[in-house]
Image (cartoon, rainbow, N blue to C red):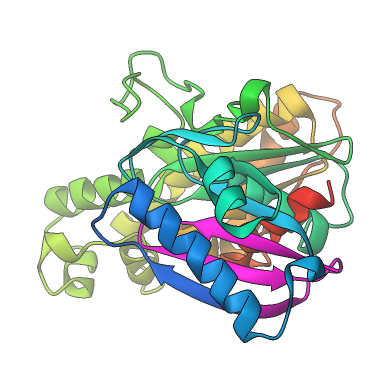
Amino acid sequence: MMYLGIDIGGMSIKCAFVTPDGEIKHKFVLKVVPETQTKTLKRLGDAINQNITEQGFTKEDFVGIGIGCPGSINNVTGVCEFSGNLNWKKAPLKDTIQEITGLPVKVTNDANAAMLGEAKFGVGKDYSDLVLLTLGTGVGGGLFLNGKLYEGKEGKGTELGHVVIEKGGRQCTCGLKGCFEAYASVTALIKNTKEAMLNDKSSFMWECVDGDLEKVSGRTCFEAAERGDKTAIKVINEYEDDLTLGIANFCNIFRPEAVILGGGLSNQGKALSDEIEKKLKKLHYGFKGTPAVKILISELKNDAGLLGAAALWLD
């Protein structure tokens, strides 16, 4: 038997046939194009049917379909109530895909899917209490507590990026000020990098982007820091302080065994996780006398959401 995992993103929809032990037997991708949400879901359902047939399988080979989708997702009704990245409102994911394919469907937020993927098949498979942070354009959060995915009421919990770490601080896209996301996302790091460059015209970071601020990315400060650039090193250190502060809060609330870092910034690998772990230790993992918390780097990368969506049928 197999499961069909679907990871919906702003640019593409990735789909895979997954075995119970997490092996991907077949993968296909649909581009997200300018069209109504109804047409996109119809196209997705048709593609599922087509790929099942073309790969020589039948519907009876599949237990069900799991979908991870960005935005406000109701895991009871299976509706994407709002997704800014997709410009979707009240998109009936579960009912539409079930109707087209004839297979049962479960739906969750994309960060929850990534959390479940890492917990079942990735770097978190040996732990029962985990926090996942996806460090990208925003900061997504996922919780795996007592060996189970935790989603909150209607699946709308675990918005870890919107915990306020500085009252009256930076404006966040959610409408609040001082959110963790406004300090720990790639967007925030890019903003910090640009400000530092404008204050230090001699920084090597200017050479990294050919003198063009529009070319600044989350990688820019790390590239310059490797050359010993003091301004870049300061940017990274301040970013890591903010990231560690948020993680310390989550340690106090959930007391996980480990925190998994995913998203674009996780590509910095062990260099990033080691520094965060050192800083977290100095903060006594949130509170003196509490157990150590490991900082891990996502192992599944782009397949985490796919595998986690499929694993909704295993949880």
The one nearer the camera, 105 or 199, is 105
The one nearer the camera, 171 or 276, is 171
**Where is the N terminus found, in terms of image quarters?**
bottom right
Q: Quadrant of residue 266?
A: bottom right
Q: Quadrant of residue 55?
A: bottom right
The one nearer the camera, 86 or 188, is 86
Q: Is 263 situated left or right of 124 in this image?
A: left
Please say if 56 is above or below 45: below
Q: Is 271 situated left or right of 116 in this image?
A: left
Report if residue 7 lies within the magenta region.
yes
What is the x, y in percent for residue 183?
Answer: 40, 36
The one nearer the camera, 4 or 150, is 4
Residue displayed at 62% across by 41% down: 108
Report if residue 91 lies within the magenta region.
no
In the picture as drawn, the residue positioned furthest to the top comes out as 167
- In magenta, the rendered stretch is 1-27
What is the x, y in percent for residue 239?
Answer: 43, 44
Q: Is residue 260 visible?
A: no
Q: Is 186 situated left or right of 163 in this image?
A: left
Report the magenta stretch's main SS. strand
What is the x, y in percent for residue 295?
Answer: 70, 51
Please say if 108 is above or below 267: above
Q: Is residue 239 visible?
A: yes
What is the x, y in percent for residue 186?
Answer: 38, 51
| Tally of marks | 0
Residue displayed at 13% across by 75% down: 210
